[in-house]
Image (cartoon, rainbow, N blue to C red):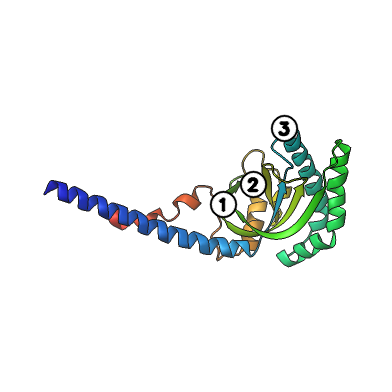
Amino acid sequence: MNVLKVLRTAVLAVLLFLTIHIIFSERVTVEQEEIAKELIRFHVRANSDSKADQQLKLEVKNTVVNYMEQILEGSQSVEESKKRIEENMDAILWEAMNTIHARGYDYDVYGYMVKEYFPLRVYGDIALPPGEYTAFRIDIGEARGKNWWCVLYPPLCFVDITHGVVPKESKEEFQNIIGEETPALTDTCSLEFKYLTFLNKYLE
């Protein structure tokens, strides 16, 4: 009898876990889709994983981010930001190419506006759920190396998060853009634990 009781409890626990997982996944997917409508991400792919190519990737990233800060300054929407990027694509890639050549490389560089999948990503103390996002992507050479990401709009690329915290003003701007009705993932633990209150009634 005790064995059957243990087995029944174990089965119920597994079913409960699966139910929670499904509900959590569905809710996060809905949130991700709402957030993705209001974001443009930036994605740089290095030529390879060699130390030199990874360093070059970061230098290209720095050049492009600094240049794009001027281009996107004052942009009020995803649509406006996307238009500015597309209108200045040649100039942006020229800046990237100049950096590559100045470091003694002859890699080609390509730029695209794409929709692609991003894993869970943390920017300072803001967490973005995994899913498909619109992104401006730059490929360096064969683009087979590790990637670098940030968010162009809202402009999280342009704030200092070296101490792991996004400035309050930037978080407020981020929340205003994605909408008050969309839960802000401004606590990196929230993505994992925000729905665990669902367990309360089972623990009483």
The image shows residue 2 at horizontal and vertical percentages of 13, 47
Q: In front: mark 2 or mark 3?
A: 3
Q: How far across and down, in percent of the image, does residue 142 sit?
A: 75, 45
Look at label 3 and name its amino acid.
Answer: Lys
Considering the numbered disc 1 on the image, is that residue within a helix, a strand or a loop?
Answer: loop
- Crowd around label 2: few <14 · some 14–19 · many ≥20 (10 Å): some
Which quarter of the figure has residue 53?
A: top right
Would residue 158 appear left or right of 202 to someone viewing this image? right
> Alpha-carbon distance for marks 1 and 3?
33 Å
Q: How many marks?
A: 3
The reply to whether callout 1 and callout 3 are in contact (CB within 8 Å) is: no
SS under mark 2 = loop
| Proximity of marks 1 and 2: CB atoms separated by less than 8 Å | yes
User: Label 1 belongs to which residue?
Assistant: 186
Amino acid at dot 1: Thr
Residue under the point 75% across and 40% down: 58
Residue at 15% from the left image edge and 46% from the top image edge:
3
In x, y percent, where is residue 137? 73, 53
Q: Earlier in the sequence, mark 1 or mark 3?
A: 3
Distance, label 1 to label 2, CA atoms, is 9 Å
Q: Along the line of sight, which residue is nearer the eye, 49 or 90?
A: 49
Per the rendering, the mark at residue 51 is: 3
Q: Which type of secondary structure does the marked residue at label 3 adopt?
A: helix
Residue 166's disc is: 2
Q: Position of residue 192 (x, y in %)?
A: 47, 50
**Precedes in sequence: disc 2 or disc 3:** 3
Horizontal side of 44 relative to 201 (left or right) equals right
Residue 183, placed above or below residue 96: below
